[in-house]
Image (cartoon, grey):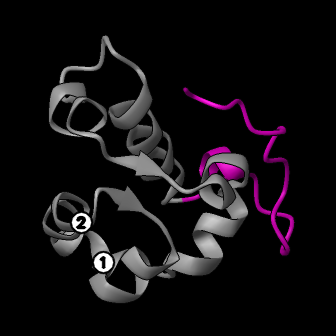
Amino acid sequence: MLVRPKHPGSGPNGELATRHPLHCTWRSMRHRCYYEKHKSYRYYGGAGITVCSRWQLSFWAFVEDVGPRPFLAARAKYAAATKVYDEAFAKEAA
């Protein structure tokens, strides 16, 4: 089930979440796992991949754990192997 997070608001430096380069990644990850009408749902949520509650509820926790963007190349491999997006995903993919 897609849990609606509290409004992400501003980050530690006053940055708006929606303008952060990882916001689209975070939103898309959640939609792939929980929104059945998403074109890739069958490969993620339909395959049992979930997002940990820390990341579901907080965009800024996701940013803190993931860090800069170079992690993207390993995303699908790790998620398929472990069936969950979480802090370990961020460390493995870095």
Part of the protein shown in magenta: 1-20
Residue that appears at 26% across and 69% down: 72
Residue 80 percent coordinates (x, y): 17, 58
Does residue 64 appear left or right of residue 82 in this picture? right
**Which residue is identified by label 1?**
71
In this view, the residue farthest toward the top is: 37
**Which residue is identified by label 2?**
75
Q: Is residue 92 above or below residue 29?
A: below
| Quarter location, residue 93 | bottom left
The amino acid sitting under disc 1 is Phe
Residue 66 percent coordinates (x, y): 49, 77
Q: Does residue 23 belong to the magenta stretch?
A: no
Q: Does residue 13 belong to the magenta stretch?
A: yes
Q: Is residue 70 above or below residue 3?
A: below
| Quarter location, residue 71 | bottom left
Measure how far apart labels 2 and 1 are at the Cα level: 7 Å
